[in-house]
Amino acid sequence: MNDILLLSLTELKRKLDRGEVSSTDAVKACLNRIDETSGLNALITVTAEQALARAAAFDRGELKGSLAGVPIIVKDNISTAGIRTTCASRMLENYVPPYDATVVKKLYDAGAVIIAKANMDEFAMGSASQNSYFGGVKNAVDSRRVPGGSSGGSAAAVAAFQAYAALGSDTGGSIRQPAAFNGVVGFKPTYSTVSRYGLVAFASSLDQIGPITRTVEDAAAVMNVIAGHDALDSTSADIDYPDYTAYDDSLRGKKIGVAEEFFGAGLQSDTGAAIEKKLAAAEAAGAKLVKVKIESFKASLAAYYVLSSAEAATNLARYDGVKYGFRTSKPVSDYVDLYYKTRSEGFGAEVKRRIMIGNYVLSSGYYDAYYLKALKVRTLIKQDYDNALAACDALVCPAAPSTAPLIGARTAPAEVYLSDIYTVPVNIAGLPGISIPAGSDGAGMPIGMQLIGRAFGDRELLGLAVGMARL
Ligand code: GLN
């Protein structure tokens, strides 16, 4: 492997700016690596020509910005003008957006070079990246295993050195859990700090875009580009956005909250032990461990699958075969038949399952029992996390209850849903969360540790994560 690929994003940027390496060399090295590791199936579209043209522009001094010349991958549910954006679905197999998502525009404005669109679970529904119309993704550390999901392509690509960073989306853990499974860093920012304009909606009250990188420092550098108020996203926060790289990374005096609910049955022993070890090291470095309670922990997964499916059923109603996307080629008798056949053929099994769950919990007679109740549980979850975070700077827990399973080993939906138990409450509460590498299990598979911060405390959380990653 070309040494240039071993640089972090921050290191590459320094060398690019000093003229020690060219963007063309970096892009070519990534494209070679993409070829060498194509068996991972991490990407849906590679934009080699466009990337090489932009790299050449940087090398001529025509591209400026904090990510100028840096090769980056974007998850395929984030709209890219002129580049197809499939959401890994047959429904959007040939969809080419007429506009860029705000994050993509911001990447371009910062001079970044987009080299590919990443594979994922169809419409970001899944935890293993096996629900893709374009075939499943493999783990970059052990190709017999799943890479996690739904941003499994983004995470595997970064772990396999195909690019220096990738954007993912996280509705219930889709950035953090695949980052954990591949031994890289995944950051889900506070809800509303990164514009969702141009992100194909899954569950709008939970969706957030964020970076997957090889270091925490690199995640902060990407945040400086993608965060910010956007009038095109009505939920976008109009706050003073910080310099995310200007963090305090010392652990001395920092209070780390630990909830015993996080270490109960179902947690793989190697994962539990790795987190305990990190916590002990943090204490030795001057951090204080604080006991907190998250009594709602067990209820969060159920609430998440009710809320996210309800929102998904609504958001996915637009794929009807009329305006854009896939349309059945079978003869149809009327418009209902057109919808029926188009949606039956265009969506995969997991997406259909979510639409059915969503419509069920929203239907009259069940709305109060499921949807309304889940909204109430949401309030309780938010209160639990806010109370806990009033007593500490961040909470620490595993990113997932186990390391990456073998492909095909866990396929029952309820079993797959369990792998999100540590990440979904963070979306429900709208908080920032980050997964950082914390050693490996007996089989050599990476373990991810999650840190959860206060709303809009993203910079502080990144600082703590830098400190913890150093231990
Ligand atoms: N795995 C979760 C789900 O399937 C989360 C997905 C996501 O964050 N996009 O809904």
Image: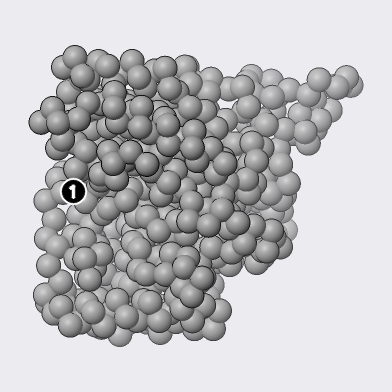
Q: Nearer the viewer, residue 430 or 208?
A: 208
Q: Nearer the viewer, residue 191 or 215?
A: 215
Q: Residues within 10 Å of mark 1 (few under 14, many from 20)?
A: many
The residue labelled by disc 1 is 244
User: Residue 171: x and y, percent?
Assistant: 48, 51
* Left or right: 413 in relation to 465: right
Q: Quadrant of residue 456?
A: bottom left
* Left or right: 334 in relation to 463: right
* Image point (21%, 66%), residue name: 470
Relative to 82, say whether 68 is above or below.
below
* Left or right: 171 in relation to 3: right
State the quadrant of the N terminus: top left
* Image point (42%, 17%), residue name: 49
User: Residue 223: x and y, percent?
Assistant: 26, 43
User: Residue 177: x and y, percent?
Assistant: 46, 58
Kindly identify the amino acid type of the residue bearing the numbered disc 1: Tyr
Q: Quadrant of residue 6?
A: top left
